[in-house]
Image (tube, coloured by chain):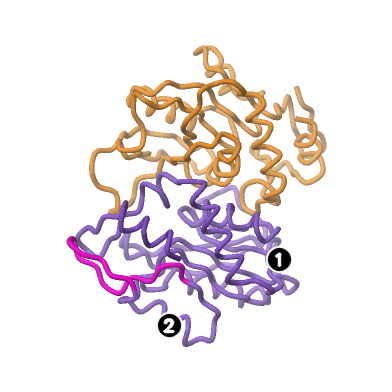
Chain colours: A orange, B purple
Amino acid sequence: MELLKQRILKDGTVKPGNILKVDSFLNHQMDIGFLNEIGKEFKRRFEGQPINKILTIEASGIAIACIAAQYFDAPVVFAKKAQSLNLDGEMFTTKVKSYTHNRTYDVILSKKFLGPEDHVLLIDDFLANGEALLGLIDIVKESGAVLEGAGIVIEKGFQPGGKKIRDMGIHLESLAIIESMTEDSLTFA
Amino acid sequence: MELLKQRILKDGTVKPGNILKVDSFLNHQMDIGFLNEIGKEFKRRFEGQPINKILTIEASGIAIACIAAQYFDAPVVFAKKAQSLNLDGEMFTTKVKSYTHNRTYDVILSKKFLGPEDHVLLIDDFLANGEALLGLIDIVKESGAVLEGAGIVIEKGFQPGGKKIRDMGIHLESLAIIESMTEDSLTFA
């Protein structure tokens, strides 16, 4: 997606530890008009698939998923990092290792909101090692829902997540794939 | 907002500990068409104010803020519960006690995204004791931005947050104010 690549080159900054900061428009401050363009592009790439639910993970996937959901006319459900006393009833659970935060989270989703009748699109901001996406895939499998695909805004192509997901036969669409990056240069695949 | 009150009566459930669960449409699964109606109503209630930024707090405020922001043509920025190694630079910080999670969070916001040039609307899903909103107000004060008001979806009128905020002279709009609730009945103010 050319608009996204240009925005990354203009406003993204690379930090030590393979961190690409896009927090001025994607995941701390959010440019809502731009997220609408991302939502339209996801719709175009998954056109014709019978998606009736968008699944994401807190926190930075929520904004993108909600704006994109408007183009699918589907509700969004987000998996929570478990710490809440406010969730009861039966939960799907999985574990997700965050390299960014250097810890493992229990991730939960109420069983009320995902089941065999659902055709699910996963949405998230980044794909690097694939841990978050693999956790969501676990939850979809456990629920009996049909996984229609995964839409990612930025994939770090030099990390193994994308290959893992594609090797599972999942329809993965990443709107920008970074081939390499340093503090001085960034190239797309 | 009548549509909201009807939805709370239809799909909300009251749990022990003064917990109102509206997780089927507002803060775990999100009905995006319904959130658009909420966004329009916030725009109506803050019509004419020069709002150029929406500020919320992760995670459950993000969806509402992003959908509402479309009616204000403004970016959203969300305060993060601090645990990230991925945030650098200077931060506004405050502490927020969560009664739901029974702990106190450090909450942070990058100084890049809020300053004296901003006219800010706060948005969140719930107002009860007011801790989250007071934390966001602290951050706005620290930034030098102008606080235009606060838009809340559901206020628990029997808890002290609403009075605290109104007594500060802040333009607070709650789309539904619950006067009392038990597992058998719920009344609006």
Q: Amino acid at mark 1?
A: Asn
Q: What residue do we see at 64% from left, 70% from top?
A: B120
For marks 1 and 2, the one nearer the N-term is 1
Q: Do discs 1 and 2 belong to a common subunit?
A: yes
Question: Does the CB distance between marks 1 and 2 fall below 8 Å?
Answer: no
What residue is disc 2 on?
A: B164
Tell me which segment is drawn in magenta.
B174-188
Q: Is residue A39 toward the left or the right of residue A136 in the image?
A: right
Would you say residue B185 sits in the magenta stretch?
yes
Q: What residue do we see at 79% from left, 28% from top?
A: A187
Mark 1 residue element: loop
Q: What residue do we see at 23% from left, 43% from top?
A: A89
Would you say residue A102 sits in the magenta stretch?
no
Q: Is residue B9 toward the left or the right of residue B96 in the image?
A: left
* Predominant secondary structure, magenta span: strand
Q: Is residue B37 above or below residue A61?
A: below
Which chain is disc 1 placed on?
B
Q: Is residue A174 above or below residue B183?
A: above
The percent coordinates of residue A75 (x first, y second) are: 47, 40
State the quadrant of the C terminus of chain B. bottom left
Which chain is disc 2 placed on?
B
Instruction: State the CA–CA distance, disc 1 to disc 2.
Output: 25 Å
Mark 2 residue element: helix
What residue is disc 1 on?
A: B52
Q: Amino acid at mark 2?
A: Lys
The percent coordinates of residue A19 (x first, y second) are: 65, 40
Q: What residue do we see at 71% from left, 66% from top?
A: B52
Q: Is residue B46 above or below residue A26?
A: below
